[in-house]
Image: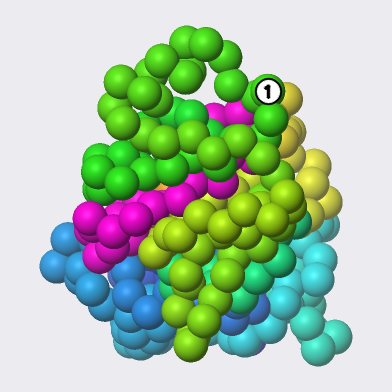
């Protein structure tokens, strides 16, 4: 089959949630999944009521089964193109195949851009973490380090402080204001100024942070506020507007500025956790089905009028 009501690009929590709701609404749905979820390195996900502690892969596998159980299609592949073709959209899910859809949901997520610190990427989602709400409870009370390489680093360190009394902010030289220093001191957040060179690992365990000047600060966990980069190539190809910060412009349901195209999950909201992304997918699906119903009504009225006109012409 190459004709669908909706093609969902991205098989994470947002995309599968949208596909599930739409499949249950008796829509013909295809999910195109590249199979590279952002949270793949994590062993467990947290904050998802009734699924707290579940491995990310287990959630996605269950979501796929549910979508298929309601008649939805799921294919593995990297969508290489999406474009409008008259009244519909054409999507290439890879392998030289083209499918057509009345509506499109882009749920392709984002990439975490990290500072150039040796060893950081290899420990990602283990003892180098980015989301205290996702992982903070599991490492509570340990010695935290926070890499201060973004403008939001001080605020981020104050949030991380909720999970430990032993927090050190590694700040570039002369980067802190006097107000920020006072705020950090007031909550006993330590400050180490200098350029971080690497995280030090021994016996597959993070031991601390090494600075470029030779200093070493023992830490059990390092929190890194990443720079979020949306995987929005398809949204750009479709002509969707992007705001001044680089994120797609949508309404509350995820509807973009291009009629017929919705966005859900981290590709539109960098701070969406798994449960938030799933909710966005559901909200998009409800809006899409309502939009399709309006189109179905218009088509039905047109056909009804044509039928009456044809009948009347015969009667004459």
Q: Front-most of 116 and 280?
A: 116
The residue shown at (65%, 70%) is 119
Farthest residue to the top: give it. 179
Using residue 246 as the reference point, say whether residue 128 is left or right of it.
left
SS for dot 1: loop
| Residue 137 picture location, percent across and down | 23, 58
State the residue in front, 304 or 238. 238
Q: Which residue is mark 1?
A: 174
Image quadrant of residue 161?
Answer: top left
Q: Is residue 175 visible?
A: yes
Q: Residue at x 77, y 61 (%)?
A: 82
Residue 118 falls inside the magenta stretch: no
Task: Categorize mark 1 by other alpha carbons within 10 Å: few (<14), some (14-19), many (20+).
Answer: few
Q: In this picture, which residue range is highlighted in magenta? A: 130-152
Instruction: Give the residue drawn at x 47%, y 10%.
Output: 179
Q: From this viewpoint, which residue is outermost toward the left?
A: 50
Instruction: Look at the picture and state if 167 lies above or below 66.
Output: above
Q: Quadrant of the N terminus?
A: bottom right
Q: Residue at x 50, y 77 (%)?
A: 41
Which picture quadrant has residue 282? bottom left
Residue 150 is one of the magenta-drawn residues: yes
């Amino acid at each position: 089959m190459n004709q669908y009501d909706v093609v969902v690009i991205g098989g994470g929590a947002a995309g599968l949630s949208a596909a599930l709701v739409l499949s249950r609404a008796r829509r013909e749905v295809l999910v195109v999944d590249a199979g590279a979820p952002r949270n793949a390195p994590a062993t467990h996900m947290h904050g998802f009521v009734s699924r707290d502690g579940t491995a990310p892969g287990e959630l996605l596998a269950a979501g796929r089964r549910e979508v298929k159980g309601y008649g939805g299609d799921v294919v593995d592949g990297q969508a290489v193109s999406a474009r409008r073709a008259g009244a519909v959209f054409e999507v290439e899910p890879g392998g030289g195949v083209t499918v057509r859809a009345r509506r499109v949901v882009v749920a392709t997520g984002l990439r975490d851009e990290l500072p150039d610190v040796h060893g950081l990427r290899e420990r990602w989602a283990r003892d180098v973490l980015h989301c205290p709400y996702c992982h903070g409870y599991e490492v509570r009370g340990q010695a935290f380090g926070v890499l201060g390489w973004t403008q939001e680093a001080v605020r981020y360190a104050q949030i991380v402080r909720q999970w430990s009394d032993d927090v050190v902010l590694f700040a570039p030289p002369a980067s802190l204001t006097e107000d920020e220093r006072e705020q950090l001191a007031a909550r006993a957040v330590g400050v180490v100024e200098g350029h971080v060179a690497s995280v030090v690992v021994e016996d597959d365990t993070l031991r601390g942070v090494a600075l470029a000047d030779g200093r070493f600060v023992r830490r059990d966990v390092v929190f890194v506020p990443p720079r979020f980069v949306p995987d929005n190539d398809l949204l750009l190809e479709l002509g969707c507007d992007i705001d001044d910060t680089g994120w797609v412009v949508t309404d509350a349901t995820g509807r973009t500025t291009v009629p017929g195209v919705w966005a859900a999950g981290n590709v539109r909201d960098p701070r969406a956790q798994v449960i938030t992304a799933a909710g966005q997918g559901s909200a998009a699906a409800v809006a899409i089905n309502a939009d399709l119903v309006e189109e179905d009504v218009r088509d039905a009225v047109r056909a009804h009028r044509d039928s009456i006109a044809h009948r009347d012409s015969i009667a004459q």
